[in-house]
Image (tube, rainbow, N blue to C red):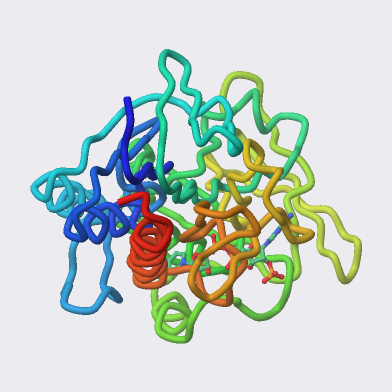
Amino acid sequence: MNFDLVIIGGGPAGLSAAIYGTRGGLTTAVIEKQAPGGQIVLTSEIENYPGVDKESGYELAMKMMNQAEGFGAQFIFDEVQSVDVKNKKVKLASDEISYGALIIATGAYPRKLNLEAEARLTGKGVSYCATCDGAFFKGKKVAVNGGGNTAVEDALYLKNFASEVYLIHRRDALRAEKTLADALLKSGVKIIWDSVVENINGDDSVESLTLKNVKTGELSSLQVDGLFVAVGQVPESKAFDWLELDAQGYVITKEDMSTAFEGVFAAGDLRQKPLRQVVTAASDGAIAANSAIKYLTENGLK
Ligand code: NAP
């Protein structure tokens, strides 16, 4: 298979790149290892994307995907094994695809706490997705760990189901934006400041957490049935470590989304940038596709 433009990752950045690429006349493939939408499908409500009043992340993702497909983008559901930059080929588990230009938009995934019981109790009370698993905790007690937008949104969402929601944060001020922080303070969510989760306790399911106050060193026990981990993101850049990465593993690009490799662009949450939102991911995708069109045209490849 051969495409003018191959996009790795079907989140907002990749889908936006597909819309701009196909509308720019490029044969375009989007390779996605799971379901399209990326991290936004984990969001119950998007209300800061211009023109969208209130919509679930899943609904917005499906609209973006249908739009890209409507313009002719082809979706390939497979996992990228490696990229042969010299010969311009993407190796998949079951196929190989040639490209003229490549956009990498693989995004980021939730960071783990790296606690002993975390992996063992994942799916048994430990979760990284409130919108996916919140409904399982109807009438139960849950805790959210983190102080960013995701943690606060998760805590507010979980108030719809749980009898008690705690938010555990390692500092005494939230990182989340003011509107969300204000909503949290009014919501009845109990905030446990200056604390980290030291242990998750339970044999077959979460029974309690051991918390440590980072200022006093004091340990305490919190009885909960669930723990939602929302302590940030890790860039999905492992397969692309040949690109220039910063200390956290984010891909360094120029303003036009180009990387140090000719014809290879990066877009979205995977990129080193100051603001990771749906709107900035979509913007990155549009710029990357535009740069790809320019690259192909100027080099007589289209
Ligand atoms: P984030 O903004 O990086 O926040 C991560 C939070 O987890 C911080 O409060 C951090 O504490 C804490 N943390 C990090 N490592 C920890 C550890 N090992 N143990 C305990 N706590 C730890 O991540 P995010 O909330 O997932 O958001 C990711 C990006 O998506 C952000 O750019 C965010 O703005 C965006 N986002 C936007 C929206 C929206 O606009 N509605 C919704 C969701 C996400 P410190 O504060 O002390 O660093």
Ligand 1 is located in which of the four quadrants?
Answer: bottom right
Relative height, residue 175 to residue 133 (above, below): below
View extreme (top): residue: 94
13 and 162: which is toward the camera: 13
**Could you tell whether 270 is left or right of 195 in the image?**
left
Taking the spot 56% from the left edge, 44% from the top edge, the residue there is 227
**Could you tell whether 242 is left or right of 58 in the image?**
right
Q: Find residue 188 and report its horizontal and vertical position in percent.
A: 43, 71
Q: Find residue 4 and report its horizontal and vertical position in percent.
A: 32, 44
Give the quarter of the figure containing the N terminus: top left
Taking the spot 50% from the left edge, 56% from the top edge, the residue there is 265
Q: Find residue 16 and report its horizontal and vertical position in percent.
A: 29, 59
Relative height, residue 239 to residue 91 (above, below): below
Q: Find residue 53 and report its horizontal and vertical position in percent.
A: 16, 74
Taking the spot 47% from the left edge, 16% from the top edge, the residue there is 93
**Could you tell whether 72 is left or right of 37 in the image?**
left
Name the quadrant containing residue 230. Answer: bottom right
50 and 189: which is toward the camera: 50
Residue 219 seen from this side: yes
167 and 51: which is toward the camera: 51
Residue 139 seen from this side: no
Number of numbered discs on residues? 0
Taking the spot 39% from the left edge, 79% from the top edge, the residue there is 183
164 and 254: which is toward the camera: 254
View extreme (front): residue: 300
Name the quadrant containing residue 300. Answer: bottom left
View extreme (right): residue: 217
